Amino acid sequence: MNLLAFSIGGFMFFIGLEYLVSRRTGKNYFQFAESIANLNIGIAERLLDIFVTGLFYFFFDFIYRNFALWHFKPTWYTWFLLFLATDFVWYWYHRLAHEVNILWAAHVVHHQSEDFNYTVSARITVFQAAFRSLFWAVLPLMGFSPAMITSLLLVHGLYPFFIHTQTIGKLGILEYFMVTPSHHRVHHSSNEKYLDKNYGDVLIIWDKMFGTFTKEEDAEPCVYGLTTPLKSHSFLWQQFHFMLELGTAFKRATSWKGRWKVLFGKPDDIDPNIRPQLELIWLRQRGPQEQTKGQRIYVVLQTGLSIILLFLTTLFEHYIPAGLSVFIVLFIIVSLMNSGAILEQKKWFFYLEYSRMLLLAIAFLFYVPHLYVFMSVLLFVGLLTFYFSRIRAYFHRWLFQ
């Protein structure tokens, strides 16, 4: 079994603990819609990582076997050197991800939330994981084995989770050489004074060496999110809005130099009027809406089910047939889209509900080949289709009142 699945439970424990601490101290660090949106992004990334992490390992292995300049043996000093190299490469990946549009398109999702808590650490996409692996490819080229790299990345990847919080203040002497929650709050801020600072992952020394370090100051509280707020909790919009902006800017560019600048220039170079134009086409927003009690209950149940399925899929990934894995992935992705649609109060969300039910029905037909199951599934789908309008109207009344 893949014991990494239990890290999901660990993350949820600390998220719950942070929530209780913030409530006990009278602080409002969690907004319902923001937290759900953050978790949805993380569920999707962790789910897809089950299938692509192995590809990253073989990618490192191919480079190590064919192009490695040296071959380091695992000793205490080579592990320490690997740690420094990993953190150094991360600094430059992270910095370039803020300065180069095509990289920012993958990384922007991590900075969209207007909250700052442990749920924000989940806002990573599989695109960002792929770009990071391209940067980390220098490690096997240097001569570190894929086993060493993968082991260190698992540990190295845990630390950033704990710096996404407002419940921990400054940490004394650690502030001089470690990335602390205080440093990372600055990094996630949209204040002009704090923009594009503190890129480090574990060590803050790289920022101090390369001039990108700034302290958090009590006189200027951090304001989180993008400089232009996203104003949407749509799962797909959060994932792809900047890619659409790049595509639009690329199409409008009148020269190859201009197109090159779109892809490899800075985010500030993209026309800020493009996003509002795309929002009119894709979002059709009605303005901010308060979530009803029914919506909150239903979205929490859906999110909880997605987390449980993610845990089980991760734990038993080597036992689940490939076809069934596809059904589970599709079911979870549609569920995440559905949660986003409900948070946005989109009346068409029930078509996603219907799609989820059809996925369940098809999965039963494939993997429980029994006559009674076949007849039951046909009856279920028939009734669901026949009473589609009535069931949809009931859901609309319950969720949107």
Image (tube, grey):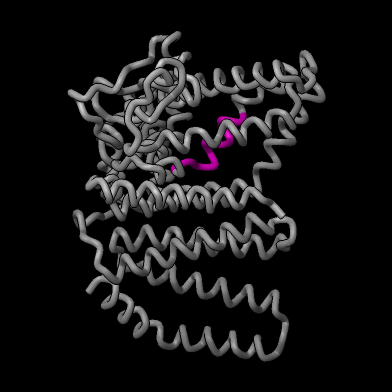
The residue that appears at 58% across and 59% down in the rendered structure is 329
Q: Is residue 332 left or right of residue 272?
A: right
Q: Nearer the viewer, residue 348 or 289?
A: 289
What residue sits 63% from the left and 59% below the top? Answer: 313
Q: Which residues are magenta?
A: 123-133
Residue 274 falls inside the magenta stretch: no
Quadrant of the frame with the C terminus: bottom left
Report x, y in % for residue 340. 37, 57
Q: Determine whether 392 is above or below 87 in the image.
A: below
Q: Relative to 159, is 5 on the left or the right?
A: right
Percent across and percent down for residue 237 are 38, 48
Evaluate whether residue 227 shows in this view: yes
The residue nearer to you, when weighing 76 against 57, is 76
Callout count:
0
- Location of residue 315 by image quarter: bottom right
Q: Is residue 52 left or right of residue 119?
A: right
Looking at the magenta stretch, what is its main secondary structure? helix
Q: Residue 111: name its quadrant.
A: top left
Q: Which quadrant of the view contains residue 268?
A: top left
Residue at (46% x, 21% y) in the render:
178
User: Residue placed at 76% from the left, 26% from the top?
Assistant: 145
Q: Please tell me which residue lies in front, 8 or 77.
A: 77
Seen in the picture, residue 151 relative to 255 is either above or below; the reply is below
Quadrant placement of the N terminus = bottom right
**Image coords of residue 380 (percent x, y):** 53, 86
Q: Is residue 335 above or below residue 197?
A: below
Tell me, yes or no, if residue 261 can be seen here.
Answer: no
